[in-house]
Amino acid sequence: MAILITGASSGFGAAMATAFVQAGYLVIGTARRTEKLADLHAKLGDRFQPITMDMTSKDDIQAALAHIQTLPEYFREIDCLINNAGLALGLDRADQADFTDWETMIQTNIIGLTYLTRQILPKMVENKRGYIINMGSIAGNYPYAGSNVYGATKAYVRQFSLNLRADLHGTGVRVTNIEPGLVEGSEFSNVRFKGDDKRAAQLYEYANALTSEDIAQTALWLYQRPAHMNVNTIELMPTTQSWAGMQVYKDTPPPPPPVVEPKPADFAPQPAPQEESGFFSKITSLFK
């Protein structure tokens, strides 16, 4: 039986493929970049089988699954699917974001992940064992400016994972959503900022962030837990990261009122008040 890891050409995926192979497991790694997968195969040997696959294409996913059935027999049954492929594009405000970026994130992070999971699940249920590990994010738990659709896709992954747990009750299939915070050593921010490596590097400078290896070791630890134990969600942050205070927007304070210069007439003596006359004044005088 094998571990199927999507997005295995770099970052979390490559680190997870390495960790699992070094722990003695068989791994199938998929990604769009064939040359990167070939490099990883050269490094890890035949316990790692690379397959080129685009998560935004159902035809590509079907072709990859068919290719798995041509591999040596011990690779053909998937015991664990790690839905790692995903991306964030842009950090613009919602009214200024590129809608094409939104479509790409939805297609990859939601539709591709969901479709592949649906293809893998029936065999796991039939075998009464298996593991779905989804790669979520703290962006699916906590809103922040610029996260808009990316955060929404990760909120979907979180809820999808929990709903799978409910659906798969009694089948023996485990489901976990890994929710990392700030992690360096991947191409995540380079992709998000569309090749602006300087901007990406500044994000992690002096931050002492988590690493891809931290996430890989977490996934390996999860897989190695006993079959009777299911970790529903696991949220990870570097010690240097925490929840920011709630933002408060304040309007520009109004200008002070104009200063009115007094006129000379304002200082003229005022006439003395005149004595009141009439019935009430007479009554009042009795009490003086």
Image (cartoon, helix red, strand yellow):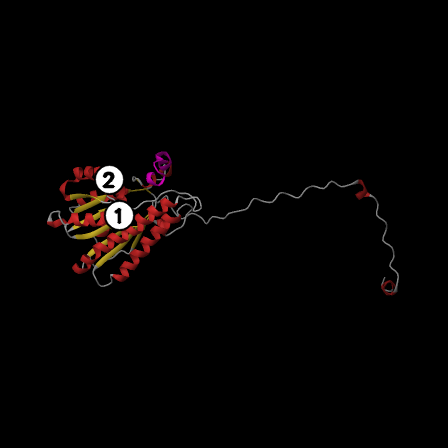
| Residue that appears at 25% across and 56% down | 175
Q: Is residue 226 visible?
A: no
Q: Earlier in the sequence, mark 1 or mark 2?
A: 2
Residue 202 picture location, percent across and down: 38, 36
Q: 233 or 272: nearer the eye? A: 233
Would you say 93 lies left or right of 3 here? Answer: right
Could you tell me the amino acid type at mark 1?
Ser
Residue assigned mark 1: 57
Q: Determine the CA span between mark 1 and mark 2.
A: 15 Å
Would you say 265 lies left or right of 88 here? Answer: right
Q: SS class of the residue under badge 2?
A: loop
Residue 46 picture location, percent across and down: 13, 42
Give yes or no for residue 227 being in the magenta stretch. no
Q: Is 200 placed above or below 134 here?
A: above
Q: Is residue 5 visible?
A: yes
Residue 160 picture location, percent across and down: 30, 56
Q: 11 or 280: nearer the eye? A: 11
Closer to viewer: mark 1 or mark 2? 1
| Residue that appears at 36% across and 34% down | 198
Give yes or no for residue 198 being in the magenta stretch. yes
Could you tell me the amino acid type at mark 2?
Arg
- Disc marking residue 33: 2
